[in-house]
Each structure stands twice: as structure tokens, then as C-alpha cells.
Image: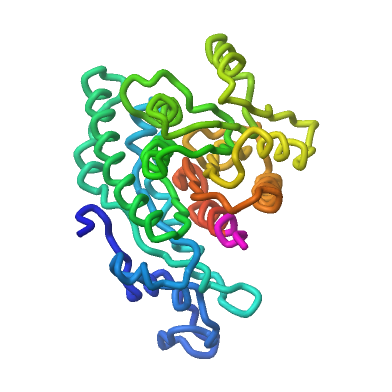
Amino acid sequence: MMTHFHFLTREELLSYNSKRASINDFTGVELEDDSTTFAQAVDCCTSLAELKQSPSDYVIIGIPEDIGVRANLGRAGAAQAWDAFLSSFLNLQHHSDNDANRFCVLGHVILNDLMDECQSLNANNHKERIQLSEAVQIIDQRVSTIVKEIKGLGKLPVVIGGGHNNCYPILKAFNGIDVINIDAHTDLRVANGRHSGNGFSHALEHGYLRNYFMIGLQENYLSKSMREILHDDLRLSYTAYQYDYTNIAEDVQLAIDHIDSTNYGLEIDMDVVANFPSSAQSPIGFSIERLRKTVKEILEVSDEMPRYIHICEAAPIYGYPNQVGKALANFVNDLP
């Protein structure tokens, strides 16, 4: 029994459908036409037993939290990305050229209890920051449990965060794989406590992460000690963001050469996109299209599909929810 996971029902999925009556009928008619939306067509499973029988390749789950970001002294807001994603993704149109049956929208990790408990905590207070860190460790347990179940059924989890702290429980569920992380930051901070800046450090320390390649790293933010770590640890490598360099194929090939492309996870941190509403928003970075092309190139040249995909750190409150929702929806719908 999944105590801390909410399986979305078909009724809940359909509640995200936009209602648009005909201009000639203002009586509350459901929809303007009879087009089929993703809310109607994606697979809906209300138990792991149903998921086992699902023909869908991709299982989408949400982690609506930003406790890890706050524990890292970052800006809250990533907890709303899951709902923004659903609002856009479930209104996509299902047809022969855009098949919703690839996806099962399973549901989300239940975290409202922890979010409520942590709402008033201030990370600038040492004692309260420790409490935030302890809450992240509980999140780790809940996330790892559902991801391990999805993995065990031979499905590909597509995880919508949430903070980048959730890379750790995902990697724990896979227990030893490589990672390509498209990100402006390493998230290799010291493995003391738990927060969004040290998920990969903990994963390396426990053997859950083997080889790690970062694309789009912004070197301006690398400390001397971090530069030394990246230079000395042969498990780590990266390509830096350069505004006047756009050889996507070369960046991706360097990543593929560094990792085992038959056994890897793909991480996408929305902080890498310039001016995108995110936890560590920056005017410098990739365009949305460059990010999409980078992901496309990775999927095309790797020997196999990634074992999981994790999209994190989007924060709708710093922009427009539909902006975030549509971006995330397109990233997921780009999957073959």
C-alpha cells in the first residue's frame, strides 16, 4: 500500500480541461468541439496493480515541494510546478500525430503535511534549517519508494519537481547509474544535511551515482574548492555555458562519452534557462529551444533511453503559471 502517494483519478485529470463554450452559446456548454485532450486519453491507473498492466512507456509523477530549496537558502515556489504542468499537459490535443497513450499520469507524492509543518520555518535560523533538512530526509523516503516501484515494473519514470534535492532519492531507487544533468550548477555541495544543493554529493557518497556529466554549467559560480573537485574526481566532467558557443552535438557527445548511455538518468534543472521562473533564476543561460534541442540530441545519440527523467526547480510564482506549465509540458511531450 502506497501510504504517501496520491493516484490521480480520471475525474481529477478531467478537472484540468479548459472549458470553452461556443461563442453562440453561453449556457455553460462543456467544450467548443469534440476534440480529445490528453486528460481524456492518457492512461490513468489508480493502483500499482493497474500500472503493471498499463501499455504506457512513461509514468509521470509529481513532487510538489520546495522544502529542499528553502533548506538550501533558495527561493520557494517549486512546489507549484506540478499543478502548472498538469494544467498545460492535460490540455494538449490527442491525435494520430500526438499520441497521449505513451503516457500514464500516475499522481504525486503526498507532501502537504511536511509543507504545512515547514511553512513558517526560516532557513536563516540554524535550528530551523536543521528542521528543514530533516524534512527533506522524509521526502527522500517517500520519493524513493514510489520511484522504486515504477522502476520495478519496467517503466520509465518522468518526475516533475520540486527541488533538485529529489535527484538523491531517485538515484537511490536505481542504486547505481550514471547521470547527465543539464544545469547551471553542480549541486555537489558538501554532503552535510540534506537540501537541493547536495543531492548528487550524497548519491556519490553512497554509491547510487557512478559517473556524472553536467551540461551548461556556469563557471562564474564555481568556488575554488569546487573547481578542484571537478578537476580531480574522474567520475565528474562538464561543459560550461558559453553565450557565443552553440555546438549542441559536441556538448552531447562529450556527455555520452563520459557516461554509460545504456544505464543513465537525465536531469533537467530549469535554472539553466535564461529568465525562466525558477528557484535560482538568472538572465544568463540557455534558451528554451536550445534546451529542447539538447535533450533531443541526447535521446537520439544515446544507446538507450534514460532510465528516468527528472525536471526540477521551475517556480511559477516568479513568472506566469502557463509559461512554466507549457514549457514543462512540451519537454515531456517531446519524448518519442
* Viewer can see residue 163: no
- Left or right side of 298 for 145: left
Q: Position of residue 249 (x, y in %)?
A: 77, 42
Quarter where residue 271 is shown: top right
Quarter where residue 69 is shown: top left
Residue drawn at x 59%, y 31% is: 184
- Left or right side of 8 for 270: right
Q: Quadrant of the C terminus?
A: bottom right
Closer to the camera in the image, 159 or 325: 159
Q: Position of residue 94 (x, y in %)?
A: 56, 76
- Vertical order, 186 against 118 (above or below): above
Magenta range: 330-336
- Vertical order, 139 against 60 (above or below): above
Q: Position of residue 218 (x, y in %)?
A: 63, 26
Q: Quadrant of the N terminus?
A: bottom left
Residue drawn at x 26%, y 19% is: 125
Residue 93 in magenta stretch: no
